Amino acid sequence: MLKIGLTGGIGSGKTTVAKVFEVLGIPVYYADEAAKRLMNENENLIKKLKEQFGNQTYIDGKLNRSYLSSIVFNDSEKLEILNSIVHPATIEDAARWMKQQITPYVIKEAALIFESGSQKDLDKVIGVYASAPLRILRVIKRDNINKEEILARMDKQLDEEMKMRLCDYVIKNDEQEMVLPQVLELHKKFSSEP
């Protein structure tokens, strides 16, 4: 079974592309959702987060997201520490999940595939590309946040052009080309590979 990564910057439309693969019957592992779940369920991860960021990281056994965000958002060193704790657990969880699937290929949707080093566990990586101005507009509409907040998030991700160069395939989600034919072409390719 092929293990395919799906990545792109904030607002690129990678989740939309992932949903198209799901409609085609392909299981998708959503790394962000999994990380949130693991930070609330994985005892080892919870222990490490409390050791690193204090007991107030959890309130009544649930992750105190606003507290943790306030610590890591403007401190790249603390964010790096958080990622060094959460990424390995998520990569391990994804590997377990992939072993349980029985389709010709699976998709792992994650914004930080290259940043987390998880590309080495994948056979191919698809990038979803949209220009920065379009991505900013999408996120403003979707999350109802301002441009400065979006730029701050973009700043924490690998440069989009660089990310796309690292990908094996790129789906353009720029409102100029239709996404569906691009996904169908890759679906056909991955379904027929041994």
Image (spheres, rainbow, N blue to C red):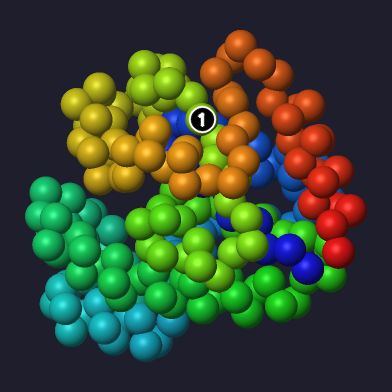
One can see residue 140 in this view: no
One can see residue 78 in this view: yes
The residue lying toward the viewer, choosing from 43 and 62, is 43
The N terminus appears in which quarter of the rendering?
A: bottom right
Disc 1 marks which residue? 129
Name the quadrant containing residue 65.
bottom left
Name the quadrant containing residue 52.
bottom left
Q: Residue at x 47, y 71 (%)?
A: 90
In the picture as drawn, the residue positioned furthest to the top comes out as: 176
Q: Residue at x 76, y 41 (%)?
A: 186
Name the quadrant containing residue 102.
bottom right
Answer left or right for 56 relative to 154: left
Q: Residue at x 77, y 60 (%)?
A: 105
Element type at marker 1?
strand
Answer left or right for 151 relative to 188: left
Coordinates of residue 183 in the picture (x, y in percent): 74, 35
Coordinates of residue 158 in the picture (x, y in percent): 32, 44
Coordinates of residue 141 in the picture (x, y in percent): 42, 20
